[in-house]
Amino acid sequence: MAAILAFMLCLVSAEDFNMTLEPAQFFPRHNSQRVKIRHGPFTVASMDVNNGMADFQQENVQMPCTDCIITWMQAGLEYPNGTVANADTNLWLHHTVFWNMNRTSAVCPGLDNLDTFFASGNERTPANICANGTEQAGYYFASTDTLGMSVELMNMSPFPQSGVVTMTYEYIPKPPPSFSHVKALWLDIAGCDGNSDQPVKSTTQAFQYTSPAWVSDISGKVTFIAGHLHDGGTHLEVQRNETEECDCVATYGANSAYLGGGMSMSTSMAMGASSMSMSASMATSSSMDMASMSMSGMAMPTSSASSGLMDNVHISNISTCPNPENGVVSPGDVWKSTAYYDPSQHDLMLDANGSAASLMGIALVYVAELNVTTTSSGSGAASTNATSTSGAGAGVVLEKGIVGVMICLGWIVAVGTSL
Ligand SMILES: [Cu+2]
């Protein structure tokens, strides 16, 4: 009896810890699957180290499947115990970016520019490529593709914190030819130089940045457009041939997870006090910065500075354009994006020394290529069935499962012999 119980417990523990199944939302007729993959944990030092920011990069990132088409995906941030991390818990998903190591960027061609097919800030906008199931389109993962990812986390706590980046993918295994592949167009105010951060132009007045124009060399249908801004941003406009294709509008503090976690008088005073109390001789420049920050806090001419709080209401949502009207891409089209910021309306994010942190403005435009349809990547494809256990990610599950069962069998033998 004990052995049976132990075996049942083992089956549970043998489940993959990094990937869980969730209910699929679109295309059930095509055996759609939804999985959530956990990356990390990534540990960030306390906020007085590098403004609480830490960057991580990984290659050969776990994939949900291969020979499959991703119709929808969304990033998130959790603690290792599975609870959500956000501004209200002082741990932000500043941003995460995923790229395909096997393809180059459509907008910034060149061997050094890999195909960044997904990015997310703390607003965690889903890439709704299939436009809620109205477009048979998605980003194709071939059996030969490998992924890389980078993540920047921000810890606004005086203590180190660890976060787990989650990626939820909905996909169609072995998609039928009716599904089109999408290209991801990355329209960045910073252009193609690889660093999206831009310096703040003003801490008091509205300003804007426009990306370099991209002249299309492809034909296709736009299925989805999303934008990314930092706090202080009001909207990001995507233009095709000087005509607005999508206006991605930022909403602030729509739920309590997006309140708090900014620089405040109390945070900075506490930080200064804690580093002072550790040791007088350890009063480093960071504790001095904290002290000066609390002073600058009093002097900041922002709307909330008078309350002693700065940037405590954050972007919680940026509107998107699924299946935009007139959404076509033709060779010769000129595309660009413009990011609008207004610090008089919304506080800018601050570095630990009280200065305004750098800004971003990125649009991701997913274009279903015309006359290009999904084909199976050959008999060598990893996917041999049409369930969630297809693909490379499932290989990991399977391996872990086998290891788990083997460990468990050993344990059962041990339990059995000791009884
Ligand atoms: Cu960003």
Image (cartoon, rainbow, N blue to C red):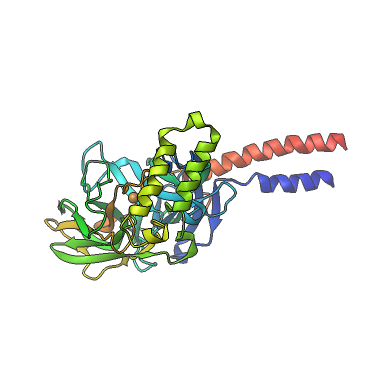
Q: Residue at x 50, y 38 (%)?
A: 275
The total number of labels drawn is 0
Q: Residue at x 34, y 43 (%)?
A: 100
In the image: residue 146, left or right of residue 366: right
Residue 129 vertical placement versus 391 (above, below): below
User: Hey, which quadrant is residue 253 in on the image?
Assistant: bottom left
344 or 373: nearer the viewer: 344
Q: Position of residue 128 (x, y in %)?
A: 37, 61
Residue 57 vertical placement versus 297 (above, below): above
- The residue furthest left is 332
Residue 345 vertical placement versus 75 (above, below): below
Q: Position of residue 235 (x, y in %)?
A: 27, 63
Q: Position of residue 73 (x, y in %)?
A: 41, 56
Q: Residue at x 81, y 37 (%)?
A: 415
Residue 191 vertical placement versus 312 (above, below): above
Q: Is residue 286 visible?
A: yes
The quarter of the image holding the C terminus is top right
Q: Is residue 49 visible?
A: no
- The residue furthest right is 419
406 or 60: nearer the viewer: 60
Q: Position of residue 208 (x, y in %)?
A: 20, 57
- The residue furthest bottom is 325
106 or 308: nearer the viewer: 308
Q: Residue at x 63, y 39 (%)?
A: 402
